[in-house]
Image (spheres, helix red, strand yellow):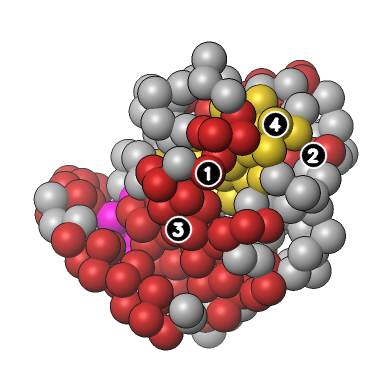
Amino acid sequence: MPNADAQYASPQVQGLREDLALALRAAAHHGLSEGVCNHFSVTLPGTVDRYLINPRGLHWSEVRADDIVLIDLHGEVLAGRHRVEPTALFIHGAVHRLTGHAVVLHCHMPYATALTLTSDRALDPTLSQNAMRYMGRIAIDAQYNGLALDDAEGERIARSMADGRDVAFLANHGVIVAGATIAHAYDDLYYLERACLHQVLAQSTGRPLAPVDPALAARVAAQVQGEREQSDMFFEALRRLLP
């Protein structure tokens, strides 16, 4: 295994640290952060047991590339000058290890979290156009069991994301959005909250909802997945807006 300090300083990992820090600042800009809690992570290329994650105690709006921490699946800090929040170790380590997703974004964004408090627990992907992009991708972890402070909690959450599902609604808790790249996962996180906002607003009218046929929603989902250049362009726009 390469030396962690050298790996951390390599140009490829420096780019990942910059992108992860940008995603955190963007989430703060978009109102998706909560205090100094929650976590975004990405595995190092070619590894399954080392990943970058935001540090404990910094507001997401102030995180820069040099604040990002490199840890292993046991939560040991391999490089970086900060500590890591304990629940991050159990949730992110398990999801990376059991699902194989390279990027794992976990937060308590308001409207998505609101839907985890309902009996349905999640977004209805047959409602708004934004929601349709998540058709067939949503997992639900319907068991809330307190703070994720042991391996069993993280593993249960990860197992809910079987069959390649990359969006998880965690009952009474928040959401996880996973993906292959930081840009694509952040785009999905952003539009997930927009879709949840639209559903909550529609439900608040008290009028009957008007879902589309699931087959149509699945077709829209495939269309979005086939046009991810838009996700990359959005992330580059955020790079210009939040340098």
Q: How many neighbours does mark 2 have within 10 angstroms: few (below 14), some (14-19), or many (20 or more)?
A: some
Q: Nearer the viewer, residue 3 or 227?
A: 3
109 w.r.t. 216: above or below? below
Could you tell me if the residues under marks 2 and 4 are in contact, i.e. CB atoms within 8 Å? no
Q: Is residue 156 left or right of residue 239?
A: right
Determine which quarter of the picture holds residue 37.
bottom right
Considering only order in the chain, which callout, 4 or 2, is on the residue closer to the N terminus? 4
Residue 75 appears in the figure: yes
Q: Which mark is residue 78?
A: 4
Secondary structure found at label 3:
helix
Please report the residue visible at 61 percent of the width from the left and 35 percent of the height from the top.
5
Residue flagged by tag 1: what amino acid is it?
Ala
Q: How many neighbours does mark 4 have within 10 angstroms: few (below 14), some (14-19), or many (20 or more)?
A: some
Q: Which mark is residue 19?
A: 3
Residue 203 x/y as whole percent = 53, 74
Please give the range of residues in magenta: 129-134
Considering only order in the chain, which callout, 4 or 1, is on the residue closer to the N terminus? 1
Q: In this rendering, which labeled residue sits more in front, label 2 or label 3?
A: 3
Determine which quarter of the picture holds residue 195.
bottom left
Considering only order in the chain, which callout, 3 or 4, is on the residue closer to the N terminus? 3
Q: Which mark is residue 9?
A: 1
Residue 162 x/y as whole percent = 46, 23
Residue 150 x/y as whole percent = 83, 25
Q: In this rendering, which labeled residue sits more in front, label 3 or label 1?
A: 1
Residue flagged by tag 2: what amino acid is it?
Thr
Please report the residue visible at 28 percent of the width from the left and 55 percent of the height from the top.
133
Q: Nearer the viewer, residue 111 or 102?
A: 102
Please report the residue visible at 13 percent of the width from the left and 50 percent of the height from the top.
226
